[in-house]
Amino acid sequence: MTTIYEYSSQPRFWVVRDEDGYWLVPARNGGWEERSPFVGHATSLREVKDLEGIDLGLSTQ
């Protein structure tokens, strides 16, 4: 299962949690290809329910 969280708005990034861990992903089409491991600390991340037409390129979306 994949869960997407809002991380920052300028520049726009999401934190994506999947079975392999947490990833920092640019919130744009194809952003999954530019992901990097998320090693930061964040509290109260809001789950993204509406991807606003963005296709990250995840096979499990």
Image (cartoon, rainbow, N blue to C red):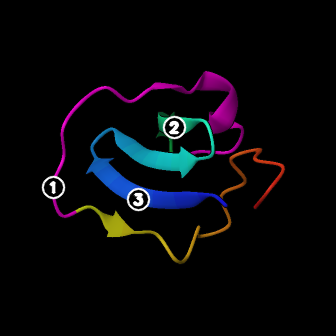
Q: What element carries label 1?
A: loop
Does residue 38 belong to the magenta stretch? yes
Q: Kindly identify the residue that appears in the image at 75 percent across and 61 percent down.
A: 61
In the rendered structure, find residue 22 and report the number of the disc placed on it.
Answer: none
For disc 3, the marked residue is 5
Reply above or below: 48 against 57. Answer: below
Q: Are marks 3 and 2 in contact (CB under 8 Å)?
A: no
* Structural distance between the alpha carbons of marks 3 and 1: 11 Å
For disc 2, the marked residue is 21
Q: What element carries label 2?
A: strand
Q: Is mark 3 on a helix, strand or loop?
A: strand
Q: Kindly identify the residue that appears in the image at 72 percent across and 54 percent down.
A: 55
Reply above or below: 5 against 21. Answer: below
- Residue kind at label 2, given as amino acid type: Gly
Q: Kindly identify the residue that appears in the image at 31 percent across and 50 percent down.
A: 7
Q: Where is residue 15 in the image (x, y as percent from the top left)?
A: 42, 46
For disc 1, the marked residue is 43
Q: Nearer the viewer, mark 3 or mark 1?
A: 1
Does residue 7 belong to the magenta stretch? no
Q: Kindly identify the residue that appears in the image at 31 percent across and 26 percent down.
A: 39
Q: Nearer the viewer, mark 2 or mark 1?
A: 2
